[in-house]
Amino acid sequence: MKPIYLLDDSLAVEVFFSTEDCDLEDNICLKIVESCREEEKIFIHDESDLFLTRQQARDLANTLLEAIKKSEEPGL
């Protein structure tokens, strides 16, 4: 899957099914890669992987969709 770039393209976020971990419950990978100066970093490492279960991934996706709906409401 193509990365999503945030924070002036200094933070790349990828989400994918980890085939290497297909036998594990948490096999959806949220990969975050930072490419900025050390003093600007949000995370300790240049690359961080957060593994989610299917339900956690669904919950995250639904929460993001709800936030999008709220932001599109008129009168905000």
Image (spheres, rainbow, N blue to C red):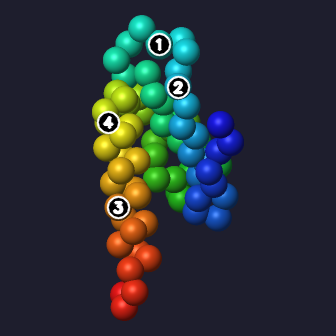
Proximity of marks 2 and 3: CB atoms separated by less than 8 Å? no
Residue at mark 1: 22
On screen, residue 54 versus residue 9, left or right, reads: left
Residue 25: x, y in percent?
34, 17
Q: CA distance from mark 3 to mark 1?
A: 29 Å
Amino acid type at image mark 3: Glu
Q: Give the quadrant of residue 57.
A: top left
**Could you give the CA–CA distance between mark 4 and mark 1, rounded to whole angstroms?**
16 Å
Query: Going 31% across and 33% down the picture, which residue do you hit?
Result: 55
Residue at x-position 65% and y-position 37%:
1
User: Which residue matches tag 3?
Assistant: 66
> Which quadrant of the structure image shows residue 69?
bottom left
Where does residue 59 sit, x and y in percent of width and height?
Answer: 31, 44
Q: Around disc 4, counting alpha carbons within 10 Å, would you say few (fewer than 14), some (14 to 19), or many (20 or more)? A: few
- Where is residue 61? Give x, y as percent: 40, 47
Of the numbered discs 4 and 1, the one sitting upstream in the chain is 1
Q: CA distance from mark 2 to mark 3?
A: 23 Å
Which circle's residue, 3 or 1, is located before the other in the chain?
1
Give the secondary structure at mark 2: strand
> Dot 2: few (<14), some (14–19), or many (≥20) neighbours within 10 Å?
some
Judged from the image, the secondary structure of the residue bearing numbered disc 3 is helix
Distance between the alpha carbons at the discs numbered 2 and 1: 8 Å
Q: Residues within 10 Å of mark 3 (few under 14, many from 20)?
A: few
Check residue 17 in the rendering and tell me which mark sits there, or answer none: 2
The residue under the point 33% across, 54% down is 63
Which one is in front in this view, the residue at disc 3 or the one at disc 1?
3
Work out whether residue 11 or residue 16 is closer to the camera in this orientation and state it.
16
Going by the numbered disc 1, the residue's amino acid type is Cys
Answer with mark 2 or mark 4, whichever residue precedes in sequence. Answer: 2
Residue topped by disc 4:
56
Residues at badges 2 and 1 in contact (C-beta under 8 Å)? Answer: yes
Q: Earlier in the sequence, mark 2 or mark 3?
A: 2
